[in-house]
Amino acid sequence: MNKYIVELIGTFFLVLTVATTAILLGAASPLTPLAIASALLVMIYAGGHVSGAHYNPAVTLGVWIRGRCASKDAVLYVAFQLIGAALAVLAAKALYPDQAKVLASLAPVAQAVADTAKGSGATCPVAAVFPVILAEFLFTFALVYVVLNVATAKRNAGTGFYGLAIGFTVLVGAVAVGRISGGAFNPAVAVGISLLAKTGPLTFCSIWQHLLGELLAAAAAGLLFRTLNADDR
């Protein structure tokens, strides 16, 4: 049970940081990507020895395909990660109630835009579909690929740089494509932010784009690792 609680805690603080810095505070600070990457980094070092510090259903999928996570653990990891994301959204609203009310007030406007777009035949008015899927695919792939190679490969066993490598991968992705997709690279983050955001690149309208790109990327990274490291099982 300890490892599931660690997954909940780590995901909670990651999603809380995203929700407060990137959504409720309007991503006004250039330090927002660094704050998010740092939250992931410190939580990896805090919980890596207990659960492996996935904090991301895409990472769990990749590690499961790689063969380092039992099916039961994979299912429970994802469940606790999603619970952590939902609790983080509640905490973010409690910390910034005024900003949360402003977001809530945007809901009727966002719905009106969505209804208008549906009437014109569009499936999602928030963002162009392909760039979002591609952005999430590319950097989720990079993230899972890095995790598998620095945190699970036998040749890197005992090294202490894995947290930095993983955190900086998220930082690079957030800076490179954050304006396109919101830079989730994580289904738990995507679900959490979609519960909070009413407009922008990551809402209920567009969440399928994120999940599709992220899960395809995780599967691709896991399969590629197995192919390139056939002797590392």
Image (cartoon, rainbow, N blue to C red):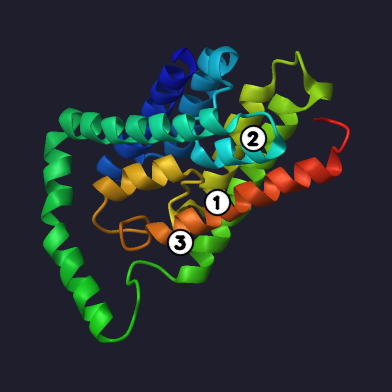
Q: Quadrant of residue 160?
A: top right
Q: Residue furthest right?
A: 231
Q: Is residue 191 above or below residue 17?
A: below
Looking at the rendered structure, the kind of residue marked 3 is: Gln
Drawn side of residue 152 relative to residue 7, left or right: right
Residue under label 1: 215
Q: Nearer the viewer, residue 220 or 183?
A: 220
Q: Percent x, y for residue 73?
A: 53, 28
Residue under label 3: 209
Cα–Cα gap, marks 3 and 2: 22 Å
**Crowd around label 2: few <14 · some 14–19 · many ≥20 (10 Å):** many
CB under 8 Å between callouts 1 and 3? no
Q: Nearer the viewer, residue 61 or 167?
A: 61
Q: Find numbered disc 3 in the image and state the secondary structure of the residue it sits on.
A: helix
Question: Residue at left 44%, top 23%?
Answer: 10
Residue 39 visible somewhere in the drawing: yes
Q: Is residue 1 above or below residue 100?
A: above
Looking at the rendered structure, the kind of residue marked 2 is: Val
Quarter occupied by the N terminus: top left
Mark 3 and mark 2 lie on one chain; the one further toward the N terminus is 2
Q: Which mark is residue 63?
A: 2
Residue 136 visible somewhere in the drawing: no
Q: Nearer the viewer, residue 65 or 53?
A: 65
Nearer the observer: mark 1 or 3; the answer is: 1
Q: Find numbered disc 2 in the image and state the secondary structure of the residue it sits on.
A: helix
